[in-house]
Image (spheres, rainbow, N blue to C red):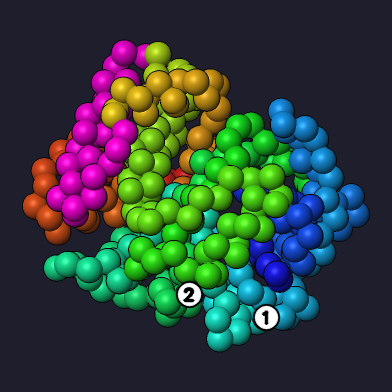
Amino acid sequence: MKVAVLGAGAIGAYVGAALHRAGAEVHLIARGPHLAAMRQHGVRVRSPRGDFTAHPHATDDPVEVGPVDHVFLGLKANAYAACGPLIAPLLHETTSVIAAQNGIPWWYFHRHGGPYDGRRVESVDPDGAVSAVLAPERAIGCVVYAATELEGPGVVRHLEGTRFSIGEPDRTSSARCLAFSEAMQAGGLKCPVEPDLRGDIWVKLLGNISFNPISALARATMRQMCLHGGTRKVIEIMMTETLAVAEALGCEVGVSIERRLAGAERVGDHRTSTLQDLERGKPLELDVLLAAVVELAEITGVEVPTLRTVHAISDLLALRSAA
């Protein structure tokens, strides 16, 4: 199996290191000091499950890699539309794209069935700009439950979780999903092929849609947000509104809000990816989290006043931080 990791940051480098350890041909595509460190020292993983170092090929030039079986996309969703020149050299006729993104993916309604089948979510795929680069037919959905951070160039700190749930938009159990799942499991990761990944998307989104923007606005960790009575209540309301949108789309989310909050509290003083991006001066990935669900609420006629309020404030924060 030949795999390219486009955007080999904390999650991408961790997956690439695991796949390489399992014997896959892995190519990490990155840049800057992080790339230089991986070239010189490999990917050094620091984990409570055991430290290890892997030495996959690392480059900043996809042409050097050529077509692969799978592209594991570790870029932020707001970079997808502009990644055409990077991803084009990696594609052959059957190359799959496995996007490790939070929130609502650009392919959400691809082969969805029902009245919304084929509909475009403008917040995440404006004027089809993402679909033009990443054809929905190539997409394998991926929901990441692992938490990682870049401790330094070439050094990945694995905090918790090893699960990467994957699935086809049309809900089939495909050969390409099964092959990728087996490779991930051989590398020590959990990678179930879900019969309908959209349920996992909404379970993960329950946390991301609330904790991520609130963490950036309050500069708070997961534990701090859970223990503060006011923010905990706001988060509960945001989760309730999100569940209503999911149900309006015919997706039953098999997890309670209390259980989701308890799980977040157990993570401890972890800083969300949005807070990390804010602290590092990077663009905030909020469109696929908040704006997309507000758009879906408009489509389905669900009232989401708290989501709208938090979206307005966090959107201003995103604009000001990018200025």
Between residue 55 and residue 184, name the one nearer to us: 184
Classify 315 as above or below 7. above
- Magenta span covers which residues? 228-255
Classify 145 as above or below 103. above
Counting labels gives 2
Q: Quadrant of the N terminus?
A: bottom right
Residue at 45% x, 20% y: name it. 265
Q: Secondary structure at mark 2?
A: helix
Residue 234 forms part of the magenta stretch: yes
Instruction: Identify the residue under disc 2.
Output: 138
Q: Position of residue 159 (x, y in %)?
A: 64, 31
Q: Position of residue 123 (x, y in %)?
A: 31, 61
Q: Residues within 10 Å of mark 2 (few under 14, many from 20)?
A: some
Q: Amino acid at mark 1?
A: Pro
Q: Residues within 10 Å of mark 1 (few under 14, many from 20)?
A: many
Residue 267 visible within the image: yes
Classify 166 as above or below 279. below
**Residue 310 figure quarter:** top left
Instruction: Identify the residue under disc 1.
Output: 67
* C-alpha gap between disc 2 and disc 1: 14 Å
Most common secondary structure along the magenta stretch: helix
Residue at 64% x, 45% y: name it. 189
Residue 248 forms part of the magenta stretch: yes
